[in-house]
Image (cartoon, helix red, strand yellow):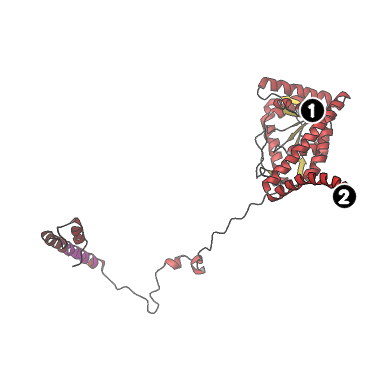
Amino acid sequence: MSFLLSIFKPIAYISLPVILVRTAVSSSPMGLYYFRRGLYLGCMTAIATWGIVVAATMSATGYRYDVNWVIARAFYAVAGTVMGIKVEVEGEEHMLTKPAVLLSNHQSMLDILFVGRMMPKRTSIMAKKSLQYTPLGPFMSMSGAVFIDRGNNARAVRSLEAAGQLMKDRKISLWMYPEGTRHLSKEPDMLPFKKGAFHLALQSGIPIVPIVTENYWRIYRDGFFGTGVIKIRVLPPIPTEGLTVNDVPALTERIRDQMLDALHDISVKVEVPAEEPRGPQPTIPNEIQSDPSTFLSSPNTEDEGAFSPPDVNPEEILEATRTSSVASISSSDSNHREQRSEPSENGAETEEDEGMVLVGRPT
């Protein structure tokens, strides 16, 4: 008996927190959101920790620019399975273009999972310089990431020039987010593009490969973290040879329009809840709807029993009105003088009494 207790007692202690977490998650949508978010970040931390060892080993053996491919695929295999999210890719053959500037729309931290599915070999990532001093910094440095100091324009330009030369010499592609920051909304949309990636492509003569991830607001947003299938479309490469700096604005708008069209095409339409009924509405007879003038027209005087006004001379009506008005004014003035000379029934004369006379107080 004691042997069985020694086995089942630790299992009971271990299962208790699991049961409590499961109960809290199942009873609260926000609890489920934070649980799945923590699970996703846990996968990211575990792979990043393992990635430091992989990056150090591969860098030492001459495979530095394949580190991202190994780590990315491992992260997608683990996190995609744990989170229940699958990625379907259309036009993946365009990712074979080497070297290339890979441009993708940026919606949230969930994009890392899609990069894990899409990342080709010999591809580096451009990131802001502040990430170099985070826990991901050592891994990113060993994997050949290009850090940009966005607070210093001169340093940013020099970093882009060095990155372009490195891409040409080593046949390395560079993954960039032209929006510059994350943007997730209910309707599929993108922020205006920054022009740094386009200057880099033109200066190096490297083609641009647009990558469009569908709007996944239905799967992930603030307060909700679900499961499902995400679609990604890779557009054909766009050559930049022969273009000059003056062509950058037009090229930027053209590529953004192409990506925006693809975004609308592959995104699942989010259903808008129907408006609540406002109660019964008054109905209008069909006769009035078809011809409203019939409701406003005068009655037919030819019908039996219908009222027919007598013929009256307008001049006679005007004369009678004038005579009546003069008589009324004279009578009112006479009554007014009589009442002023008599006391009120309740005492002295009041303004109320005078007012009652003016409006015709009953006798």
Q: Is residue 211 visible?
A: no
Q: Residue at x 73, y 47 (%)?
A: 20
Q: Residue at x 76, y 42 (%)?
A: 232
The CA span between labels 2 and 1 is: 51 Å
The circle drawn on residue 352 is: none
The circle drawn on residue 1 is: 2
Q: Is residue 124 above or below residue 352?
A: above
**Residue 292, how many percent across, how many down?**
47, 65
Amino acid bearing label 1: Phe
As drawn, is 91 to the left or to the right of 344? right
Residue 276 covered by magenta stretch: no
- Image quarter of the C terminus: bottom left
As drawn, is 230 to the left or to the right of 341? right
Label located before the other in sequence (2 or 1): 2
**Residue 49, how many percent across, how many down?**
80, 31
Element at label 2: loop
Q: Which residue is mark 1?
A: 139
Amino acid bearing label 2: Met
Q: Is residue 130 above or below residue 328?
A: above
Residue 321 covered by magenta stretch: yes
Q: Which range of residues does the magenta coloring cover?
A: 317-329
**Residue 255, how many percent across, how many down?**
71, 36
Q: Nearer the viewer, residue 147 or 12?
A: 12
Determine the residue located farthest toward the front in the rendered image. Answer: 2
Q: Residue at x 72, y 43 (%)?
A: 35
